[in-house]
Every structure is written in C-alpha cells, then in structure tokens.
Image (cartoon, rainbow, N blue to C red):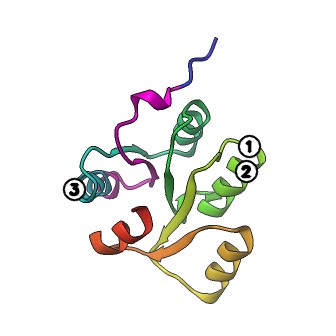
Amino acid sequence: MEQKIEASEKKGLHVVYIDDNDKAGFLMHLVIERISPGAICRYFPTIEQAIEYIRLTIDIDHIISDLNIEHNYDGFTLYRELKEKDILRQARFSILTGSIDEQVLEQGHALGIAHILPKPISADELKKILI
C-alpha cells in the first residue's frame, strides 16, 4: 500500500524544482530556504523522479520546472501530464527558461501555466511568485 506524505509534516512553503542541471537545483534549494525560512524544496533531475514524488505528496504549493528538461520532454509536457494524471492538485506551476520568445509565452499561457520566467531568476523575482 502506498503511503502519502501527510500535510501535517509540512511547516512552511513546499516547492518541487525540476531541472537536469544539478548546480541549478542546488542553488534553487538554497534560495528558496533563504527567502522562506522553514520551506521545503525538493529538487529532481529527472521527470520520472519528480512525477513519482508529486504523485505521492499531497501538500505541494508550487512546482517549478526548467523548460528543456530531457531530450523529448519539456516543462509543457510535464504540466500536461500532471494535469492528465490529476496529480497537480492545488500546486501552482511555473516554468523557467533560458530563452523566452512569443511562442513560449503563448504556449504556456494557453495551457494555464502560472508563470514563465527567464533563467537565471533573481531571489526577488522568485519570492514574488512563491509568497
């Protein structure tokens, strides 16, 4: 039997970050903990790991994904899959990308993605979308 992660374990903001760059994951973890003391930031370098965690976790506040994660898998595909599997729940979803153009913005907004932001993102910008 699967065990869901209980909301009672939560003490602050709960963020999931997906990026195939380990350095970006480490930095995001540090920044989130600094702007929101007591926050939980879970970093995943692969889609499979992230989806499994999201599926089992009931109290995620925000999911942030790099746009270009894996070869044929991007942040838009991840968002659609989370919605289709009905595991996004109440979590807001944002995308970070090194290159924002009109097509990326249009696609993200058409899907209903909360924010599409440039990489690197400042701590102040991140705080605005999280808190």
Query: Considering only vertical position in the picture, is 103 above or below 2?
Result: below
Q: Position of residue 25 (x, y in %)?
A: 34, 53
Front in this rendered view, residue 124 or 48: 124
C-alpha distance separating marks 3 and 1 = 31 Å
Which element is circle 1 on?
A: loop
113 part of magenta stretch = no
Query: Considering only vertical position in the picture, is 4 above or below 1?
Result: below
Of label 3 and label 1, which has the lower sequence position?
3
20 part of magenta stretch = yes
- Label 2 environment density (alpha carbons within 10 Å; few <14, some 14–19, many ≥20): few
User: Which numbered tag is attached to residue 34?
Assistant: 3
Q: Position of residue 119 (x, y in %)?
A: 39, 74
**Residue 91 horizontal side relative to residue 14, left or right:** right
Highlighted magenta segment, given as a residue range: 5-25
Q: Are marks 1 and 2 in contact (CB under 8 Å)?
A: yes
The quarter holding residue 38 reads top left
Residue located 67% across and 76% down the image: 109
Q: Position of residue 93 (x, y in %)?
A: 57, 59
